[in-house]
Image (cartoon, grey):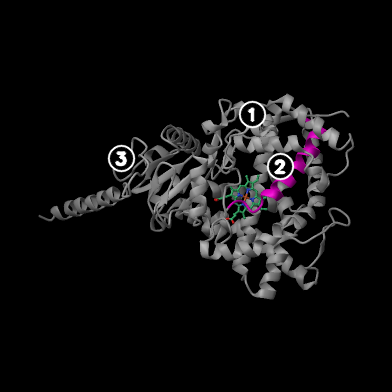
Amino acid sequence: MAFLVPVLILVVSFLAAYYLWRRSYPDTDNEPPMFPGALPLVGHSLQLIGDSCKLWNAINDLAQKSYDIGGVVAAAIGPRTIYVITDPDDFFTVANACLQKDDFYDFAKPWLGEGLVTGTVSIWKNHRKLLNPAFSQTVLDSFIGVFNSQSRKLVKDLKKEVGKGMFDHWTYTRHNSLETICLTALGVDFTDHTILNSRYVQAAEEIFYTMVDRFQKFWLHSPMTFKWSGVKRTQDRCLKILHDMSNSVLQKRKSDMTGNVLSERKTGMSSGTKFKPFMDLLLELAIEKNVFNDREIREHIDTMIVGGHDTSASVLMFTLLLLGSHPEAQEKAYQEIQEVFEGSDRDVDKHDLCKLVYLEAVLKESIRMYTIVPVVARKLDRNVQLKKYKLAAGRTCFAFLCGIHKHPMWGPDADQFNPDRWLSPDTLPDNPNAYVGFSLGRRMCIGKAYAYMSMKTSLTHILRNYRIHGDHKQLVLKIDVMLKPVSGYNISIEKRTR
Ligand code: HEM
């Protein structure tokens, strides 16, 4: 008889799991159809297991299915049902109705805590209001000196690659971007700390990988199983490096503060340039209004470092690859720069930026083609009525920003790099929500204007010094939270003669 006990436990567990799984099926009228191939208990999870290229392919398959049936499809990860949206209007509806990020963002909480990207709505609302002034146009304008000097530094660093054939410009661009965010947002000069920077960049790459790895292995979703896994041990090792960096940034600024240089800082990078870094605002609010404790400040710093450098650097790298693959577009961008600057090598100023219309079109098209934040997710805290379907409260809703950017509304050339489409409303989709590179609604990117300013400045300096060659068709893509090429960002550069 004793053997019956384990059998009984097994049968009861199976029935309980089956019940939970069934319960996760539509319980509102008119839910989106389920992507074919879901298995009991595990749903589509087996299709996700594998390397992060496989995940990228699965995302594209889901996006395709979603277009076919009206912009939304359901899928199952383990016993939970999730929705996938590729329709821009439906994403707009969800983005405004539900501000809470999904539980999957908790995978990043040991690192980013209640920083803006991962923050719980109640905390986020208050903090976003307090932090918005740090990204005002006046503050951003004061960063232009740093953007110029950092871009000149990048041009100088790249010089050693001239005429040497293909190289991966990841190291140069990523480090440069990390230094820029430390200087502008944090007010700390890490330009001479190459070892610290390399370890940080490496650890950030690795921790993103652990998050995706955990996502793909649905049995690690529970904190109970995750706690004992090798993935957690890797994450802890990375966290130590990442937190050491942000803590040292915090200590450095605090000691500056004791030296009474908090309220207005001279960068030393660009003589006469004064600006107030984001970090100083945090420290001032902590002291004067008692709103942030040390842990919260560190979490905001971590969020700004990662949100601010990896994203802009990735866009810059994909853009150079695209321009390298489209010499006519590169020439057009170069000619525009020559006209705006009348052939001179002077620094970019705030008035130049709005004149660089084609360059902005290039950046937008690059973000559309290679959407570096391909997916965002919200927790549905209410039923949400979309154009065609109704989403049930309690579920996860993924918006495939990459899918929205290739939606049939972009026309038959949606897969082609065509910056010219941005030059006239007639060649753009007749939908204001079709471009979602920085997300939509109240939780959209706080750093959008910062990103365009820094990327336009860098591109101006790079393009007037070098002619770029590359082939984006060689890219094999993967998703490590952000979109990345497996094969590296390989380009070659040639000095321009003016
Ligand atoms: C081209 C560069 C960038 C792209 C494509 C980008 C994209 C995005 C996207 C799609 C989101 C929404 C994330 C989500 O809902 O999970 C986001 C949020 C955010 N981004 Fe960016 N970003 C860029 C640059 C920056 C920069 C330069 C900063 C800071 C200096 C920054 C800081 C943030 C923050 C703090 C959030 C969270 C906003 C909130 O929830 O209130 N980003 N970004």
Q: Amino acid at mark 1?
A: Phe
Q: Nearer the viewer, residue 221 or 20?
A: 20
Q: Report the Cα–Cα distance between label 3 and label 2.
A: 44 Å
Quadrant location of the N terminus? bottom left
Q: Determine which quarter of the picture holds residue 426.
A: top right
Q: Report the Cα–Cα distance between label 3 and label 1.
A: 38 Å
Q: Which mark is residue 173?
A: 2
Taking the image as shown, residue 488 lies to the left or right of residue 395, namely right
Residue matched to label 1: 417
Query: Is residue 468 at all visible to an observer of this figure?
Result: no
Span highlighted in magenta in the image:
444-467
Quadrant location of the C terminus? top right
- Location of residue 93 with respect to 280 vertically, above or below: above
**Considering only order in the chain, which callout, 2 or 1, is on the residue closer to the N terminus?**
2
Q: Tell me the crowding category of disc 3: few under 14, some 14 to 19, or many 20 or more residues within 10 angstroms, Cα based.
A: some
Q: Which mark is residue 147?
A: none
Q: Nearer the viewer, residue 14 or 383?
A: 383
Q: Which residue is pictured at 46% across the width and 51% down the height?
A: 230
